[in-house]
Image (tube, helix red, strand yellow):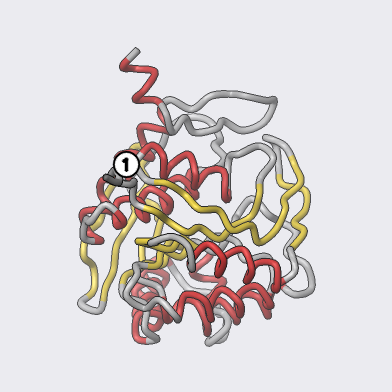
Amino acid sequence: MQNQISPLILSFGASDPVAATGIHADLASFAAMGCYGLPVITAILTGDTSQIDDLHPLDGDLVDEQARTVLEDMPVLAFKVGQAGSVENVTVIAEIVSDYPELPLVLDPFNAALTEQGPEAEDLVLAIRELLIPQASLLMISAVELSRLAETWKENTETDAEAETEDLAADTMMLIESGCEYILVTGTAGETGEVVNTLYNESGVVRRDTWQRLPGSHAGAGSTLSAAIAALLANGLEIPEAVLEAQEFTHAALSHAQRLGMGRLIPDRYFWAREAS
């Protein structure tokens, strides 16, 4: 008799030697949520806890081979897509996930810690917008990244705070009309010392959650949140409930963050195990 297996999640992302972001953050968050992660490496990062120095994309054929070999062997319940690394890899990933439209896809393709975007940056953003976002069950994106993405379809003009809020809502609707089911916009300003995350769908705002900003600089908060959402979807939760529970988990992981090096704090995704002991 076969034992019941943990929910399987196929994750596309970069390999981070610090294990703060990317594939390694995904695997830790999946495990914390009772899921089993299947890593498909799209790129290799170099850097430390202070910064990410560079990104080295893998060949698209290798990304395709990693994913399709696993998908032919195991019953995956969800996809998580992080950094693709190149336009070629975006195309490959988009073709793969299009073969499994019934599976939820959590898309978190931007890494704010990677400051040097390179000459392909604009083409990469455009490819993500055209090929991956229309297939996403949930796109997670910061307010800053959303504004940058919106520059691909409108002129960049200076606006006041009220207009920026209206633009934010309009930009999310633009992406939802392209096919994306939900968008979680993170990091919008709240009251002093607060961070606001807002979930949208075709009807507008679904939920708005406010969190106290924690002291210190953290690496991997976004990866932790998007991976936790994917894990909760694989466990059968609906997106609004998964978003709330994933935020609670991420906030707790950040509250227990560890200083492993001389740079930023790293979320402790296994805080609950240490508390229990």
Instruction: Give whichever of 62, 174 is nearer the camera.
Output: 62
Number of residues whose C-alpha sits closer than 10 Å to that of mark 1, classed few (under 14), some (14–19) or many (20 or more): some
**Residue sitting farthest toward the front:** 1
Image quarter where the N terminus lies is: top left
**Residue sitting farthest toward the top:** 277
Picture layout, residue 107 above or below residue 266: below
Location of residue 267 in the rendering, given as x and y in whole percent from the top left corner: 49, 33
Picture layout, residue 5 above or below residue 120: above
- Relative placement, left or right, of 246 versus 147 is left
- The number of numbered badges drawn on the structure is 1
Determine which quarter of the picture holds residue 204.
bottom left
Q: Report which residue position mark 1 lands on.
A: 211
Asked if one can make out residue 143 in the rendered structure from this viewpoint, the answer is no
The residue tagged with tag 1: helix, strand or loop? strand
Picture layout, residue 18 above or below residue 69: above
Instruction: Give whichever of 264, 275 is nearer the camera.
Output: 275
Instruction: Give whichever of 203, 166 is nearer the camera.
Output: 203
Asked if one can make out residue 82 in the rendered structure from this viewpoint, the answer is yes
Picture layout, residue 13 above or below residue 137: above
- Relative placement, left or right, of 86 versus 112 is right
- Relative placement, left or right, of 259 versus 238 is right
Determine which quarter of the picture holds residue 60.
bottom right
Location of residue 24 in the rendering, given as x and y in whole percent from the top left corner: 57, 43
* Residue at 43% over, 60% down: 74
Location of residue 215 in the rendering, given as x and y in whole percent from the top left corner: 47, 29
Q: Amino acid at mark 1?
A: Trp
Location of residue 26 in the rendering, given as x and y in whole percent from the top left corner: 49, 47
* Residue at 31% over, 56% down: 234
Image quarter where the C terminus lies is: top left
Instruction: Give whichever of 170, 157 is nearer the camera.
Output: 170
